[in-house]
Amino acid sequence: MSVADVESPPPPPPAVVLQGDTNDPHTLLRAVFQYYCRFGRTSTQGCSTDVTLVKLKRERRITYAMFLEAMGIMALKKYPNLTLNHGQQLDPPNTVITLEKTQLSLEQYQRQVHMVNTLSRVNSASQAEVQDLEDRIKFCYMLQDEVAELVSDLPRGYEAYRRICKEVEIISANLEASVKYMAKVHMHRSGVVVSEDSPRKRENAALNKLFPHGMAPGIQETMKQIMQAEHDRVRFKDAKRPVDDKDDDGDDADSFRPSEFSDLCLGHMEDTAHSTWQPDEDSF
């Protein structure tokens, strides 16, 4: 017996030939329709495919649209959970592109805020490093506006919407904390401890204008004497005035006020400075 006799015979040719795109489901369905719904494939008892809408033998065959309707009815009975309402909805292309842009901008925003947080805690920073830090902070605020605009374009019911909003909130809070810390350190280094509108600020500005190189010891002693005399005068008036004449709130026209006292001291100091000032030979 030869080897050819032992080998199995070749498979029979396919009964149905697919015509068209094999990835298209209608190609397979149309082939099934042509095979099972032709003459000789139906009977009064039906067939094994359970196509109940197939006509009887020698009668008019059903159309392809009726065949699809029958297949849909059978699929709905067998798989009730696989309807169009329960199917997975794909995101539109615009939403996917917006999500990718938002994610990239969010990652860049997070990197810049982390760098700002690191640089703001450097103790001895040069002028160039401080300028670089300020530029980074401005860039962070630009990224914050860009991310907020991209997030507003995302649908509210999107699954990643809440996660992105939470990340933006956390990163923005870290940025604000870093900016406040840097401003606090800068104010501490520059020695700004009083407000611009306070009497102490105006007094210090006037002193620096009158005495750019500092006050002489004699002027300091004169200033102390003026302050002590004014303080004694106010105490003497308060002790001499009857108790009934005093206001309940303690606010009187002759009471001690820091702003008026500062103006008085500055007036005496200006008179002293003009009386003791002598021109230098180098000024002419």
Image (spheres, grey):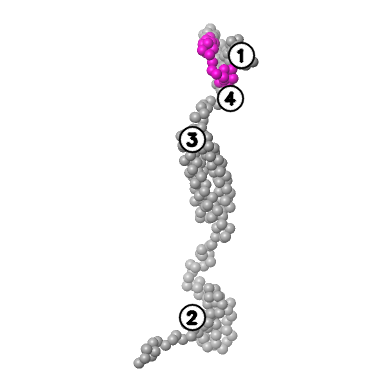
Please state which of the two labelled residues, at mark 4 or mark 1, is closer to the viewer. 1
User: Separation of disc 3 and disc 4 at Cα?
Assistant: 30 Å
Image point 42% across, 88% down: which residue?
9
Q: Residues within 10 Å of mark 2 (few under 14, many from 20)?
A: few
Image point 58% across, 15% down: which residue?
266
Going by the numbered disc 1, the residue's amino acid type is: Glu
Say if 2 sits above or below 27 in the image: below
Q: Please state the horizontal and vertical placement of residue 244, each as a whole percent of the image.
A: 54, 11
Please state which of the two labelled residues, at mark 3 or mark 4, is closer to the viewer. 3
Please state which of the two labelled residues, at mark 4 or mark 2, is closer to the viewer. 4
Please state which of the two labelled residues, at mark 3 or mark 1, is closer to the viewer. 1
Callout 2–callout 1 Cβ contact below 8 Å: no
Looking at the rendering, the stretch of residues picked out in magenta corresponds to 204-230
Residue corresponding to mark 1:
281
User: Separation of disc 4 and disc 1 at Cα?
Assistant: 38 Å
Q: Is residue 203 magenta?
A: no
Predominant SS of the magenta segment: helix
User: Separation of disc 4 and disc 2 at Cα?
Assistant: 94 Å
The secondary structure type at the circle numbered 1 is helix
Q: Please state the horizontal and vertical placement of residue 83, each as a whole percent of the image.
A: 51, 67
The secondary structure type at the circle numbered 3 is loop
User: Separation of disc 2 and disc 1 at Cα?
Assistant: 122 Å
Residue corresponding to mark 2:
49
Residue corresponding to mark 4:
197
Callout 3–callout 1 Cβ contact below 8 Å: no
Q: Please state the horizontal and vertical placement of residue 115, each as a whole percent of the image.
A: 49, 43
Image point 58% across, 58% down: which residue?
94
